[in-house]
Image (cartoon, helix red, strand yellow):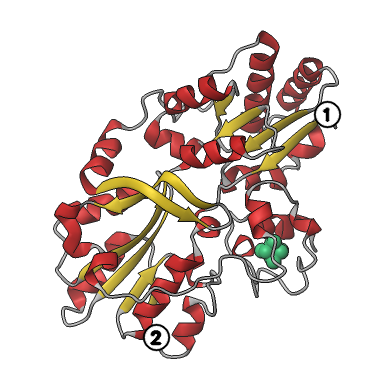
Amino acid sequence: MKQSTGFRDARYAQAIVNEISSLVDGRNIRIVHVCGTHEDTISQHGVRSLLPDSIKLVAGPGCPVCVCAAKDVDMAIELSRKGHIITTFGDMVRVPATNSTLAKERSNGADVRVVYGASDAVSIARDNPDREVVFVGVGFETTAPTIALELLGKPPSNFSILTSLKVIPPAMEILVNIEGFGVDGFITPGHVSTIIGSSAFQPFAEKHRVPCVAAGFEPLDVLESIRMILKQIQEGRADSENEYTRVVKPEGNLAAQRVLAQAFRIDDAPWRGLGIIKKSGYYIKKELAEHDARLRFEIPETESVDILPGCRCHEVILGMTDPLECSLFGTRCTPEDPYGPCMVGHEGTCRIRHEYTMD
Ligand code: SF4
């Protein structure tokens, strides 16, 4: 049955595609998005197949568990081996670290619990006052405010957070500075823009002369954002525009921004596959240090390995390699038994490609 909701209307989609074709005018255009949910929409609805061949739509670093450095997972594993209760999101449990995963540690007897959010972890801490409860907080600007709220809400003294929270705009800076990367426009992430606002990307757009458009998550949103990028290119503009006006405000969510500023400071952070990116991570402020697992526990420094032999996640995360080009795709590396982080969760590019290209 054909879907004909307002956001999936086939005739409207065709009209936008026609306009895209006339705007691109045969030029090679490379558009990058940095959001796993966008990649899911694009793959699920075959958006790439609707576009002229000269438009390349590329997935960048938009999956929070994929870019979580192995070092952070190794730390969580170390803490689980000390007998503490480790709580985190479901995807994180299966993310490969240097030699293990939290799931493997759990099967060896560690107390690793999947939670829906930091508030569940706080409840577990209240129910287990004699145990240390660590929440492994992973995500972008979208997830960070909910974690900040728990920190600010006077959690019990046996509760702490191992932060691996990332800030998206600095990662985009890295992409544009990679020699030969080449990008003509960015589809900026709708969820992140809800918090920081579409105008947060304006300095980036101006500095690098790259059009940016915040997009929603329906196929028509993505098509319309591509049309808007091409229109900017045609007009010689490079601005941060907002296609997702039904949710995103130019200024973002000011209350969420205040909460973030109260709980976190921003500093350099390691991204899997991308190395250390300046000013790209949220860390707990010193006023809340008693809940900072990095300070609360002595965790020995280990030699962590971000990318296991043969895995090409570092190239996939950068949008330089398609998952199908990895020789381990669908063989050694599957959603049931992920070898690399990009095959773990529903926002991972390899996982998404597997879901929509394999039977
Ligand atoms: S298919 Fe697996 S091993 Fe290959 S790049 Fe993707 S996650 Fe890494």
Q: Is residue 243 at least partly visible in the picture?
A: yes
Residue receiving disc 2: 110
**Identity of the residue drawn at 67% across and 15% down:** 231
**Identity of the residue drawn at 53% across and 79% down:** 100
Judged from this view, the residue extending furthest toward the bottom is 108
Is 61 in front, or is 219? 61
Identify the image quadrant of the N terminus. top right
Residue 188 in the figure: left or right of residue 157? right
CB of residue at label 1: within 8 Å of ligand 1? Answer: no
Determine crowd level at label 2: few under 14, some 14-19, many 20+ residues with C-alpha closer than 10 A: many
Rounded to the nearest angstrom, the CA distance separating label 1 from label 2 is 51 Å
**Vertical order, 154 against 6 (above or below):** below
What amino acid is at disc 1?
A: Pro
Residue 270 screen position, x and y as percent = 46, 55
What amino acid is at disc 2?
A: Ala
Q: Is residue 2 at least partly visible in the picture?
A: no
Residue receiving disc 1: 52
Quarter location, residue 78: bottom left
Q: Mark 2 or mark 1, which is nearer the start of the sequence?
A: 1
Is 99 in front, or is 245? 99
**Identity of the residue drawn at 27% across and 48% down:** 264
* Helix, strand or loop status at disc 1: loop
